[in-house]
Image: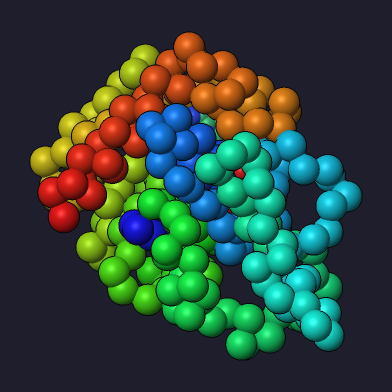
Amino acid sequence: MTVVALSGLRGGVGTTSMVAALGFALHGLQQRVLMIDLHPRNLLRLHCNLALDATRGWATAEQDAEGRWSEALFEVVEGLYLLPFGRLEVGALNEQAQEWTQRLQQLQAHFDWILLDMPAILPGGQPGGPALPEPVTRIRVLEADAACHALLSTEGAGDDFLLVNRFDPISQLQRDLLLLWGERQGKLIPQVIHRDEAMACALAWKSPVGYYAPDSLASHDVRSLATWLLAQGAQG
Ligand SMILES: Nc1ncnc2c1ncn2[C@@H]1O[C@H](COP(=O)(O)OP(=O)(O)OP(=O)(O)O)[C@@H](O)[C@H]1O
Ligand SMILES: [Mg+2]
């Protein structure tokens, strides 16, 4: 089993959309996949056709007297599962609920891939979500824009892989930044995800982009990314 934690270099770069799209693409490659929402905003569920007012999730299940986090598991399609965060009152998450080492151990026998949707990195490069056990493949999602470039230059990305989302080849700035990062950043993933209206529409359709528009450019990009990740696993 491989655990992949995706977090944005900053907010709004498409991390949650990427978790849903990648989960669907890996499932299409006959992998058993679990997507876990570790972001208190609880939005990953909306990429899996759950209701807007659905409140159930691992964090809410933990609060029931007899509740178990694993009871919130939701089968999207056979072999593809989602564990939503759930809707909590502000500040209700206890410290124990942040403990993911044991939970991931319990899950590992059942899945080939566990994808974690993490909140964006905090100022100073601090993780925005819970501490995670090793080994975890960490991917930082970013956009080829000046803000991300400034953050990369000042805070770096540690040992994380970098995944460029919403790439627009018409933009000279984006092309230049991609070239520069290719020279300077040893862990830039050699597959970008293009800016694609299908990606935005997929969320409006409450599904991963590979389901909503399998022939779209973004779908092709994400399938290549999934294949690249599988090859990385094979090397590891
Ligand atoms: N490649 C893309 N092309 C076009 N639109 C995209 C692309 N990727 C993501 N989006 C859109 O960008 C918006 C933000 O995406 P998303 O919610 O996944 O970001 P996020 O990084 O998870 O945000 P947050 O930091 O708040 O968790 C959504 O409307 C999504 O559909
Ligand atoms: Mg998100």
The type of colouring in the image is rainbow
**Of 212 and 187, which appears nearest the observer?**
212
The residue at the point 52 percent across, 70 percent down is 129
Please state the horizontal and vertical placement of residue 71, each as a whole percent of the image.
71, 66
Query: Above or below — where is 78 with respect to 53?
Result: above
Q: Quadrant of residue 2?
A: bottom left
Q: Quadrant of residue 156?
A: bottom left
Query: Above or below — where is 30 with respect to 152?
Result: above
The residue at the point 37 percent across, 76 percent down is 133
Does residue 21 appear left or right of residue 88 in this picture? left
View extreme (right): residue: 53
**Of 146 and 111, which appears nearest the observer?**
111
**Of 23 and 220, which appears nearest the observer?**
23
Please state the horizontal and vertical placement of residue 175, each as a whole percent of the image.
27, 25
Residue 185 in view (yes/no) = no
**Of 190 and 146, which appears nearest the observer?**
190
| Quadrant assignment for the C terminus | bottom left
Please state the horizontal and vertical placement of residue 50, each as a whole percent of the image.
77, 43
View extreme (top): residue: 215
| Quadrant assignment for the N terminus | bottom left
The residue at the point 38 percent across, 32 percent down is 29
Residue 231 in view (yes/no) = yes
Does residue 127 appear left or right of residue 73 in this picture? left
The residue at the point 59 percent across, 39 percent down is 78
Q: Quadrant of residue 124?
A: bottom left
Query: How many marks are shown on the rendered structure?
Result: 0
